[in-house]
Image (tube, helix red, strand yellow):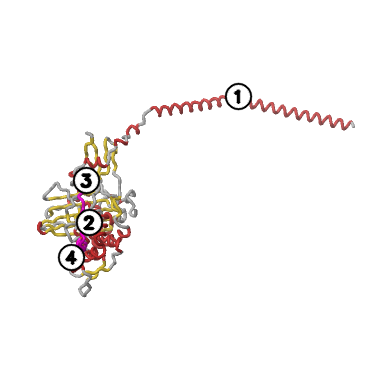
Amino acid sequence: MDAFRKRKTINSQTKFHNTAWRKYQFRLRQKSAARQALRRLPAYLLILCIGLGLIKGGFFVAHWFQSRPLPQQAAVKPETERVTRDEVRALLDRSDLLNPLTPVFSKKIAGRDCALHTTLNEDLQKAVLSMMDPKYARQIGIVVMDARTGKILVMASHDRNNPDMNNCTNASFPAASLFKIVSAAGAIDDSGLTPETRMSFNGGKYTLYRSQLADTKNKYTNYVTLEKAFAESINPVFGKIGQNYLDKARLEKYAQAFWFNREMDFDLPVDVSVASVSEKPYNWAEIACGFNKTTQISALHAAMLSAAIVHNGAMMRPYFIERAVLNDRVVFRQDRKMLTRSIHPETARQMQSMMNAAVTRGTARGSFRGRQATAIFKRFDVGGKTGSINDNPAKVKFDWFTGYARHRETGNTIAVGVIVAHKNYIGVRAAEYFRRIVYEYMQQPLNQAKAPQDAVNDDT
């Protein structure tokens, strides 16, 4: 019993000491925490002051930015003061596009100088003006355009009798066989013909008698593919196409699709190219093969025909003024626009094959021989179409070439329209001018870089 009491007393004492020890340790921790808090108090106060300073400073900075004027806003011209395309066109006169030499020229807007920046390729323009030989030419008109965008790169003109005449926009020239581009495209696009379609004709290649339009088959009949008929510009084949495949309605449809009989939306007035189709089937044959003087076209429009073909059927609106700058501010920028989808892309690709044949083994092959032609064919896909017709009373031979050149590596593509009215003697032919122009274009540094991707897609 005594032993039990003694053990209980020891346990009670042990429990008391444990409780006291815990209380002692707790008080020590409280004192330590209090001392640490006192030591950290200055740091807490410093952080609080910095935070309050940042908040107050932020309000001050925001107020400062709101109260001061923004330089960029001050430099932006109000939208209501922008110059429209019609206002820019009103600044121009015909002389501005008559053999220009610099890509920028000045006009006045409300008494202030306005710089008009053009699409002119200055080096190519000067090269073309230098190569023009007016010795035997009554008139010359040469237009070079970017087929993918519609930019006019070159406008060069000569007129012996009227130096102020711009023969780039003058549409008084007979289109001759250039219209075979329209009729061939229509026959492929609408009538199911292909470059390999077998065609027949009797008689001469460059005549068009009513008897040649009959479906005569005898031992004198000649058979050619449509591609060869196009490349060699065989009139009776295209006469039959006009009379038997296209008729009046389709001829008018595709003439309009290639922008005949329509106002040209350009920076300056351009004569309307005319294709008038009568009710007579023989006239359909005349129109389709270009064996007439009533179908008329300008050099600018001729370039657009080739541009539409190489651009897979998309005819771009031509333009010469790219932007207008007034007081160091751009107040006008030209929009690129597709005028029309002339033909389906697949039709255009077949036409490219036929136009290439005209250059390599057709009527233009004589102008594509020698060192220049070899260098061109190594780098460019080239196609074109010749056209010629005589004005016997005036002793003038109208000589046409329209064509394109597409750089295989860069994708840069030009389309060219050339008209030469030879007087008395034959001077430099239109197809030869085209070859020289492509060769000059090939030398330019721009053909060492990829073509810009901001052009309208070929298949749109």
Q: CA distance from mark 2 to mark 3?
A: 22 Å
Numbered label attached to residue 38:
1
Q: Is residue 447 visible?
A: no
Which residue sits at x=31%, y=55%? 409
Considering every residue shown, the one lying at the far bottom of the view is 219
Which label lies toward us, 1 or 4? 4
**Residue at mark 2:** 402
Numbered label attached to residue 208:
4
Which label lies toward us, 2 or 4? 4
Magenta span dominant secondary structure: loop
Name the amino acid, label 4: Leu
Quarter-wise, where is residue 321 in the image? top left
Secondary structure type for disc 3: loop
Numbered label attached to residue 268:
3
Q: CA distance from mark 2 to mark 4?
A: 23 Å
Q: How would you rate the neighbour count of disc 4 (Cα within 10 Å): few for under 14, some for 14-19, many for 20 or more?
A: many
Magenta residues, as a range?
A: 267-286
- Going from the N terminus, do you reach mark 1 or mark 2 first? 1
Quarter-wise, where is residue 13 in the image? top right
Of 432 and 249, nearer the camera is: 249
Name the amino acid, label 1: Leu
Which label lies toward us, 1 or 2? 2
